[in-house]
C-alpha cells in the first residue's frame, strides 16, 4: 500500500475554512488531487481529529449531515491506515529519535506505514526527514 503523500488534519480543515482564501485554495487543490489520483492517504487518527474539529471547533463548524457527507466523499476514500500495535510501536520508535508529541508521532508512523514519501503538515518541522519520509508545509 504505497502512496506518495500523507495528509495531516490541518489540510482537511483548511479546505472547508475559507477565512484565509489562499490557504483554503491550497488545501482544496491538495485534497482534490488526492481524491482524483488516489496517490495520498490519511489515517484513522486524522479522521477522528478532523471530525472533532469540524463538529466543535472550526470557524465554520459542520452539522452532522455535512460531516457524514464529507466522511463519505473525502475521508473514507483516503483512509488507509488503521490503529494497530505495530503502528504504536513504530510511533514509539520514532519518538526515540525525534521527540514529537505522541499524536504527531502517530501521524508520522501512519505515513511511514503507508509508504509515503511526503507528509503534508504545518504542525511539524518543514524539511524534517524521518526515514524515507519528508515533512512538508504546503501552507508556509
Image (tube, rainbow, N blue to C red):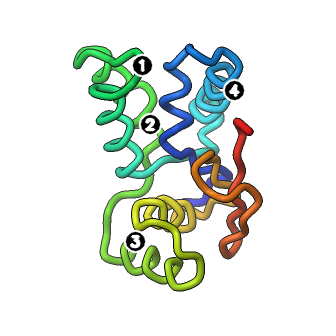
| 40 to the left or right of 113 | right
| 140 to the left or right of 34 | right
The image shows residue 123, relative to residue 27, as above or below, that is below
The residue indicated by pointer 1 is 59
Image quarter of the C terminus: top right
**Other-residue count near label 1 (Cα within 10 Å), few / some / many at <14 / 14–19 / ≥20:** few
Is label 4 in a helix, a strand or a loop?
Answer: helix
Tell me which numbered mark, 3 or 1, is placed earlier along the sequence: 1
Disc number lying in front (4 or 3): 4
Is label 3 in a helix, a strand or a loop?
Answer: helix
Q: Measured from the top left, where is residue 134 in percent x and y?
A: 72, 61
The image shows residue 27, relative to residue 121, as above or below, that is above
Residue drawn at 67 percent across, 76 percent down: 131
The residue indicated by pointer 2 is 77
**Other-residue count near label 3 (Cα within 10 Å), few / some / many at <14 / 14–19 / ≥20:** many
Residue drawn at 41 percent across, 35 percent down: 75
Q: Which residue occupies the foreground of this view, 28 or 121?
A: 121
Is label 2 in a helix, a strand or a loop?
Answer: helix
Residue drawn at 61 percent across, 47 percent down: 121
The residue indicated by pointer 3 is 87
Tell me which numbered mark, 3 or 2, is placed earlier along the sequence: 2
Instruction: Tell me whether circle 1 and circle 2 mark residues in contact (CB < 8 Å).
Output: no
Q: How far apart are marks 1 and 2 (CA)?
A: 25 Å
Disc number lying in front (1 or 4): 1
Location of residue 51 (image quadrant): top left
Is label 1 in a helix, a strand or a loop?
Answer: loop
The residue indicated by pointer 4 is 26
Q: Distance between the residues labelled 3 and 1?
A: 32 Å
Amino acid at each position: 500500500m504505497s502512496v506518495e503523500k500523507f495528509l495531516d488534519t490541518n489540510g482537511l480543515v483548511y479546505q472547508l475554512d475559507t477565512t484565509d482564501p489562499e490557504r483554503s485554495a491550497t488545501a482544496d487543490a491538495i485534497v482534490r488531487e488526492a481524491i482524483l489520483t488516489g496517490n495520498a492517504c490519511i489515517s484513522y487518527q486524522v479522521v477522528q481529529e478532523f471530525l472533532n474539529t469540524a463538529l466543535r471547533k472550526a470557524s465554520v463548524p459542520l452539522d452532522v449531515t455535512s460531516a457524514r457527507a464529507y466522511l463519505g466523499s473525502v475521508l473514507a476514500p483516503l483512509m488507509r491506515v488503521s490503529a494497530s500495535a505495530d503502528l504504536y510501536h513504530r510511533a514509539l520508535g520514532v519518538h526515540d529519535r525525534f521527540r514529537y508529541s505522541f499524536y504527531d508521532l502517530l501521524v508520522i508512523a501512519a505515513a511511514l506505514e503507508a509508504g509515503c514519501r511526503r507528509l503534508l503538515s504545518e504542525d511539524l518541522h518543514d524539511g524534517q526527514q524521518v526515514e524515507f519520509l519528508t515533512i512538508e508545509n504546503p501552507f508556509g
